Amino acid sequence: MSVELHRLSNGFRIVTENMPGLKSAALGIWVMAGGRDERPSENGIAHFLEHMAFKGTDKRTTLQIAEAIEDVGGYINAYTSREMTAYYARVLEADVPLALDVLSDILLNPVFAPEEIEVERGVILQEIGQVLDTPDDVIFDWLQEVAYPEQAIGRTILGPAERVSGFSRDDLFSFIRRHYTPERMILSAAGAVDHAELVRLAEQTFGHMKPSTADKPEPASFTGGERREVKSLEQAHMALAFECPGYRDPGIYTAQIFSTALGGGMSSRLFQELREKRGLCYTVFAQTGAYADTGLITLYAGTSGEQLGDLAELTMAELARAAHDMTPAEVARARAQMKAGLFMGLESPSNRAERLARLVSIWDRIPDIDETVAHIDAVTTGDVREFAGRLAGCGRAALALYGPVAKAPALDALQGRLVA
């Protein structure tokens, strides 16, 4: 397998990985613009724009966009995150040029017909309502808001209904002009792909675009705090977060191994203590998420209102205990889980294409897989214990509670349990 990276004169990048033996390919355009790039008045517009990309171009109707890909047995989709928006497809080898034509068409030639804007506005408002009715979805939006208050990185990706209700056609084009520029776009493909051919097609399609100097997102500032929403639900939902390194910081590997050992699987500390031994919850996990200049270690669990206090205090006890007695066996298991997840993911061309795009967006190069494995293997038990100690003693956390949570311990009280 070979990875190749090329940059057009305007900054547009093409990265590919040919995977011998495959008859299909995954490809997409990753745009380094997302919720974090929105102005306060634009909250939700990056996601709105992602929806509208499929609603017609100068040469294709909404139905024709879908038919162009599905007539050849492929699929097409998109997603919006806080730092990126992706438009991608999976097709057979012979249909790669078609897929690129469709993807470039929806990005470069959108119509944004007023009637389609209104239809999609209704769809997104329904999506917002669905999230608000799903406690274990909305609680993570609230957690992000209290972790980074009054900041773009802390605002919901979907945006509030009142903002979404007011977006205009001009607003959509304004966001595109500022952020959908060639130096912020990456064409990534994996599977049965020809790098030289994709470079040629990209030059024809994107080579005319003019680079820009869009404003950089404001630096993240983790503040922390608490949001408690009391509601009559069957379960009480708790999400807790601490700041951790961003993805350019080598410390991110220690953070990932720590969260995996703490709550990344059935053998993890939180799963064993809270679910298997005490039966306090059905779902409990810990995970690490990273951005350019910050990251979050997030813990989640759902339980009854009566048991939430015990669950929260035991969670804090496990966090504090990890600074003293995290074992070499636990760290080795977490390392093995991370490496297995990495290598298993590489068996999918879709995962490979996304990984390539993310690595190029972060490093402007493709680190060898052995380099990543070396970073994982270099994390020691002492590193994890030290990280856990810093986390326990940092004095700042974010907490979101939802459901029958009126009697749940306050954040200050819970942090008092973190005696590392």
Image (cartoon, rainbow, N blue to C red):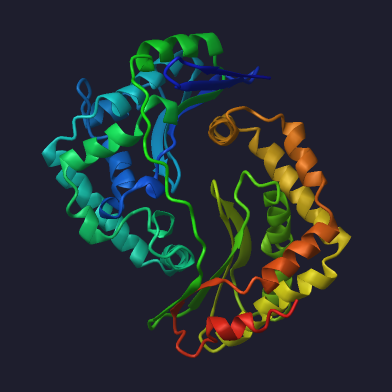
Toward the right, the furthest residue is 328
Outermost residue, left side: 115
Q: Quadrant of the N terminus?
A: top right
Seen at 42% across and 15% down, the residue is 202
Q: Position of residue 120 (x, y in %)?
A: 22, 45
Query: Up-down: is 276 above or below 49?
Result: below
Q: Can residue 246 be seen in the rendering of this structure? A: yes
Q: In terms of depth relative to the viewer, which is nearer, 91 or 296?
A: 296
Q: In which quarter of the image is residue 209?
A: top left
**Splitting the image into 4 quarters, where does residue 179 fall?**
top left
Residue 331 appears left or right of 102: right
* Along the viewing direction, whichever of 154 and 132 lies nearer the viewer: 154
Question: Residue 146 placed where, x, y %?
Answer: 45, 68
The picture places residue 4, in percent across and down from the top left corner, at 61, 18
Rendered view: 203 above or below 288: above
* Residue for point 23% across, 53% down: 164
Going 82% across and 46% down the picture, which residue do you hit? Answer: 378
| Label tally | 0
Report whether 52 appears left or right of 280.
Answer: left
Relative horizontal placement of residue 287, taking residue 25 as reference (left or right): right
The image quarter containing residue 284 is: bottom right
- Which quadrant of the rendered structure holds the C terminus? bottom right
Q: In the rendered image, is residue 89 in sight?
A: no
329 vs 57: above or below: below
- Give the percent coordinates (x, y) of residue 145: 42, 65
